[in-house]
Amino acid sequence: MASASERREELKAVFHEASSCVRCPQLAAGRTTVVFGSGNADADLMFVGEAPGANEDKQGVPFVGQAGKLLDTLLGEIGLTRGDVFVCNVLKCRPPGNRDPLPQEIDNCQDYLFRQLELIEPKVVCTLGNFATKLLRGDPTGITRLHGRVEERLIGPRRVRLYPIYHPAAALYTPAMAEILRADFRRLPELLALPVLDQPEPIVEPEVVPDPEPVIDEPDLVYDEQLGLF
């Protein structure tokens, strides 16, 4: 099992790989920077949003606009700061015009998210809004039905308690939505106090044994064998 410092170094390596990623040519050509994620590399709580917006694309940090300020406020109300958690998105690059991520872009980018989950080892993954919730659950059920309901899920290599909540942006101008979000946030401390879930056994790739070199008989021996001389 890797130590915290070893996992942190591996996470840095994943960051450097992502920072020069060109798997999605359109996103790579249009971005200002890759928004890998930020926060505590040993966090028990990870927030996953949809994709960077314009402010995030400029600064390289997720949730830096008004929704990010509300996220900071809600964390403070339960005794946490941004430095206690890890915040990232499904996509690490801003889609043009803030359009929805395309299926191929999700496929291209999901390895980075799975590696983040594997190396940070969160106990609770909090999906923010409809898109991230549907993606990580692999199910079309919307956030209205799912918010505030915790469930155990295997996401990539990590088994976590998945906890969908509304996206902070949805609560910026709707007081009733903000109160629902606050109520869901208040459950986070009790979820974080639960023990870590049992993790699946790591997949060990079978050793590939090369095929033996074919034995080629000498022509005269083959000829003798065919004639029944042996």
Image (cartoon, helix red, strand yellow):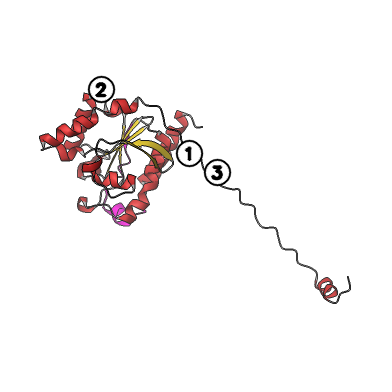
Dot 2 corresponds to which residue?
Answer: 79
Report if residue 199 is visible in the image. Answer: yes
* Numbered circle sitting on residue 204: 3
Looking at the picture, tell me which residue is in the foreground, 42 or 191: 191
Q: Looking at the image, is mark 1 or mark 2 earlier in the sequence?
A: 2
The kind of residue on which mark 1 rests is: Pro
Quick one: SS at disc 1?
Answer: loop
Q: CA distance from mark 3 to mark 1?
A: 12 Å
Figure check: 97 above or below 6: below
Percent from the top left, x then y, of residue 202?
51, 40
Q: CA distance from mark 1 to mark 2?
A: 31 Å
Q: Nearer the viewer, mark 1 or mark 2?
A: 1
Quick one: SS at disc 2?
Answer: loop
Marks 2 and 3: CB-CB under 8 Å?
Answer: no
Looking at the picture, tell me which residue is in the foreground, 217 or 139: 139
Give the residue displayed 61% in from the left and 48% down from the top.
207
Q: State the residue lying farthest toward the right.
A: 229
Dot 1 corresponds to which residue?
Answer: 200
Quick one: SS at disc 3?
Answer: loop
Is 173 a magenta residue? no
Task: Read off the magenta span.
Answer: 22-39
Q: CA distance from mark 2 to mark 3?
A: 40 Å
- Neighbourhood count class around disc 3 (C-alpha, 10 Å): few under 14, some 14–19, many 20 upward: few
Percent from the top left, x then y, of residue 90?
31, 45
Percent from the top left, x then y, of residue 124?
34, 33
Give the residue displayed 89% in from the left and 73% down from the top.
229
Figure check: 202 above or below 94: above
Q: Quadrant of the C terminus?
A: bottom right
Looking at the picture, tell me which residue is in the foreground, 56 or 125: 125
